Amino acid sequence: MRAPAPASNIEMSALLDDLRAIVGAAHVLTGDGDALLAWERDWRKRFRGRSLCVVLPGSADEVAAVVRRCAREGGVTIVPQGGNTGLVGGGVPDESRRQVVLGTKRLRAVRRLDVDNQTITVEAGLALQEVQAAAADTGLLFPLSLASEGSCTIGGNLATNAGGTQVLRFGNARELCLGLEVVTAQGELWSSLHGLRKDNTGYDLRDLFVGSEGTLGIITAATLRLFPQPRAGVAAWATCRTLADAVALMRRLRADFDAELVGYEAMNAASLTLVERHFEALRAPLPLADAAGAPLWSVLVDLASPHDEAVLRERAEATLMAALEAAEAVDIALPASESQSRALWQLREAIPLAQGVEGLNIKHDVGVPLSALADFVAAADEAVEAIVPGARHITFGHLGDGNLHYNLQAPAGGDADEFLARHEQAVNACVHDVAGRFGGTFSAEHGIGRLKRAELALRKPAPALAMMKAIKAALDPHGLLNPGVLLPD
Amino acid sequence: MRAPAPASNIEMSALLDDLRAIVGAAHVLTGDGDALLAWERDWRKRFRGRSLCVVLPGSADEVAAVVRRCAREGGVTIVPQGGNTGLVGGGVPDESRRQVVLGTKRLRAVRRLDVDNQTITVEAGLALQEVQAAAADTGLLFPLSLASEGSCTIGGNLATNAGGTQVLRFGNARELCLGLEVVTAQGELWSSLHGLRKDNTGYDLRDLFVGSEGTLGIITAATLRLFPQPRAGVAAWATCRTLADAVALMRRLRADFDAELVGYEAMNAASLTLVERHFEALRAPLPLADAAGAPLWSVLVDLASPHDEAVLRERAEATLMAALEAAEAVDIALPASESQSRALWQLREAIPLAQGVEGLNIKHDVGVPLSALADFVAAADEAVEAIVPGARHITFGHLGDGNLHYNLQAPAGGDADEFLARHEQAVNACVHDVAGRFGGTFSAEHGIGRLKRAELALRKPAPALAMMKAIKAALDPHGLLNPGVLLPD
C-alpha cells in the first residue's frame, strides 16, 4: 500500500484543476465543514471521513481519466461510491483528506435492453429500482430486491455482491450479472458487456470484481440477466414451534414448488412483538405464542409462478395443510388480497425500523448451513445470555439462504446506549465464534468494508487471506483503489 | 514461467522415490512407450505428450505433499487430470518428460450429503454420474449433465466450468458450486466447503479456481448445490422455418414455463439427416423440410416440474399450439411415452457421433447473444461458403444458452481428411471472427486448454489478458501448475 505522502495545497490545486478539466468544474465538489457530508459519512453514521474532493464523472472514459490522473499524484487514493447505502462503511473516505470520492451517480444510461436475450445493460449509477423499472417496462423481471432499492445503485450492488429477499430463487447480485465494464487501477477500460450466458475463455474476472468493494477496479456498467415477469404471486404466513420445524417446512415447500419458491423469511416472536409495539398499523396475522404461552417462529413464504394464480394458491394451501398435519406448522394464514400480502412484507421489513425506534442495538449478518441453523441459534442464545443476561434476541432474516440478522436489544428497561457501547465487541465476537463453529460466516450479505476488516483478518483462513492480498497486489500494485476497505493492512 | 531445467536421471529418481513415499509405490506410474498412453493422450487424440510419471494421490493432504515436493524440483511442473474427457487438451502433458500428471481419480469420497441444506460435498475424482446418483439416492437432483458424465470427474467439471444440456435452468458448473477445497501452488490446503449460499467475506476465490483449468490450484473437493428431483418431465419436438422463429418459440416457452424450461436444443436439418443416414434406429419425429422442400430447424424442448405430469403435458401442448398459430413453429410432436422422450434426446446426442462416422470434420463451440443467433448463423454460413464452397453445415447446440456447435463436414463426396487438414485453421478463424462481430465467444463451454491458447491470445481484450497473467503470476509465481495450458506464454 502506498503511504499517504504529504502534498502541498499547490499540488492539490493542480490535481483539482485537472479533475475539473476531465469531468467539468461543476462535477468536482470541494468544501469544508459539512459541505460534503452526504459523501463523507455512511448513512448509519458510523464512519465520518474527510475527502480531498468528490468527483462525479459523466462517462466510463471520464472515470478512466480520473483514475489515471489520480494515479500520477503521489499519496492520493480513490474511494468509489454508489448510493452510499452500504452497511459496513465501504464507500466513504478516511480522515486523511487525501482521498478522492469517485461518485458514479452520473453514469445513468440504460445502454441496451435486449428482450430476446433477456438481458439489460446499464450504467453503474442507476438506482436498483430504476433497473427493475426498465426491465418491467418490457414485461421482464430484474429480481434483485433490497430495502434500499430506491437509492442504492446497481454498481454498488455489484461491487458489494448484494443479497436481499429473493436470493433463494435468483441468487445474489453476482449470479445476476453476465458481464461488466470496469476501469482498472491502471485507468484502462475493460469490457465484457456481451450478454453471453456461457463464455469459457479464461479466468472469471467478472466474479472477481463483483464483491471486491471497489478495491480492484471501478464498475462503470453491467449486463444483467432478466427473467419473465411471473404471472401469479402468493404470499403465505405460518407459525412454527421451532426453527427446525421452519427448516422442515422450507424443505417441503422446495419439493412442492422448486423454483416457484422465491423467498422464505423467518422472524422470532420478539422481533414481531417489537414491530407491533412501535407500529400500530402492523399486526402479525397469527398469534406469536402457542396456547401454553411458548413463543413461536413466524415464516413468510413468497411464491411466484408463470401459471394461474388460483392454481398456485390452491397448491400453497395444500402444501401448508400437509405441513400442519405433519406438525411442521402450528398455524397458517393465506392473505385474501394483494394488499394483505403487502402487509405481510411490511411486517418483515419493519423489524429493523422497530429496532431503531426501540434504541441502539447490536447487529449481525451471519450465515450458516440450513441444517445447522436451529443449533446455531440455540448455541448463540446461550452464549449471549452468558455475556448480557436478559438481552433481547431479535432474530430474523432470509432463512431460505441460511442468512440471519441475529440482532440484540438491551435487556428490558436497560440503557440502550450503554448496552451498545459496553457489549458490542464482546457480543459480536461471541456470535461470530458460534457461527464459525457451525461452519458459518460473519458476513453473509453485508460485506466487509471498514467495519469488519478486523474480523476478516481474524476469521478468514490464512491461505485465503494470502491469495486475496496477492490478487490485490497484482491488480492494484500501488494501492490506489479504496485502501482501508476490505483487506487487512 | 519457469524454464524447463535439465535434470539428471538420478535427480528424477530421487523425486520419484519421494513421490512413492507420499502416495505409495503402487500409485506412481512410470513406463516407456504407450504404458501411460491413457494419461498422456487426450481422447480426441489431438495431443500426445510424454510425462515424467503419473501420480495418483489418495487424499487432499497427499496432493498437497506432491505439490510441495514437485515445487522443490527445478524444472518439474504438474498437470492435474480428472477423467481426461476434455475437448481442448487441457489435462495432458507436453512432450518434455518433465511434467508430473497428477490424477485425481483416487479422491472418491462422498464426504457429506446434507439434505436440509440441499448440498453434497464430494471429492474431485468422483465421476459426474456418481455425484448425480448419490444425490438421487436421497431424492435430490444434481443437474449438471454432459455426454461424458460416466467418465468425466466432478473436479474436472469444475476446473473447466463445464456446461451441458441444462445450463438454461441451472447454470454452468460454476453456478452449481458453493465451495471448494483446493491445493494451492504453494502446496497449501484451502477449504471453503461450508455449504453457504451467502458468504460475502472477500474476493471470490472459488469462482477464480472454477474454470482456471488447473493453472491456479488443484481442486480436491467441492460442495455442490442440489435441487428437488422434479416430479414430472415432458420432452417435446418442434420444427421451425428459421432460427429466428426458434428463438421466438423459446421466448414464448420461457414466459409460460419460466424455470420449468430446463433445456432447449436446436438442430439444423443437415445434422439430423446425418443421424438418420448413420443410425437406422434413429428417425426424426417430424419432417426435416417443409412442403416446398425448404429445410427446417428442429428444436428439442425439455420441461421439468414439481407438479403433476398430466398438467405439465397439457400446458406444453397449449403453448406449442399457440406457437403453431403464431407461425413460430411449423409442426410439433409430443412423445406419448418415456421411451419416446428418450429417443428424442438420442437423436440430439447422436449428432456428434454421426459426424464422426461421416468423417473428420471442423468443430466450433461458439456462443452469441440469443438476439444475434440467427444473424450470426447466416453470416457464418456465407463466410464459410466463400472459403469451402459446398461445405456441409452441421449446426446444432444449446440454443437456450446461445451456444452452438457450429460444425462443418466436407462437401458431399469430398475427402474428409483433406478437408480438415486444408481448411481447419482458416474456417476456425473465419467462424470465430464472425462470432466476435456479433459479440460472441469462440469457446462457450469447452474452455481453452492447449487447443485454443493462440485464439485466446488473439481474441481476448488486452486488459483481460494482462489481468489474467497478473493473477497467474500472483498465485503461481513459479509456473508450477499446468504451464502451456490456457494462458498464452
Image (spheres, coloured by chain):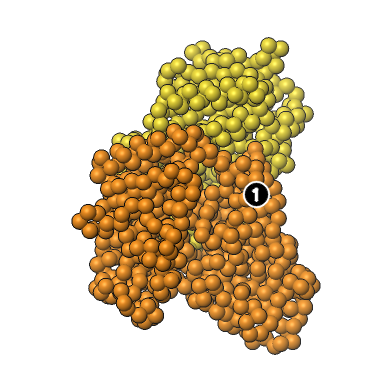
Chain colours: A yellow, B orange
Report the front residue among B127 and A449. B127
**Location of residue B56 by image quarter:** bottom right
- In x, y percent, where is residue A259? 49, 37
What residue does disc 1 label?
B134
Q: Is residue A23 visible?
A: no
Residue in the picture at 56% in, 29% down: A265
* Left or right position of B449 against B101: left
Question: Is B246 located above or below residue B230 in the figure?
Answer: below
Residue in the picture at 27% in, 48% down: B330
Report the front residue among A418 and B145. B145
**Location of residue A365 by image quarter:** top right
Residue in the picture at 38% in, 31% down: A231
- In x, y percent, where is residue A449? 55, 44
* Left or right position of A464 against B283: right
For the N terminus of chain B, the image quarter is: bottom right
- In x, y percent, where is residue B444? 43, 60
Q: Which amino acid type is marked by label 1?
A: Ala
Q: Chain of mark 1?
A: B
- In x, y percent, where is residue B394? 35, 65
SS category of the residue bearing label 1: helix
Taking the view exactly as shown, the residue that stands out farthest to the left is: B292
Q: Is residue B420 visible?
A: yes
Report the front residue among B340 and B430. B340
**How many numbered marks have been drawn onto this rendered protein structure?**
1
Question: Is B92 located above or below residue B106 in the figure?
Answer: below
Residue in the picture at 61% in, 29% down: A249
Q: Residues within 10 Å of mark 1 (few under 14, many from 20)?
A: some
**Location of residue B439 by image quarter:** bottom left
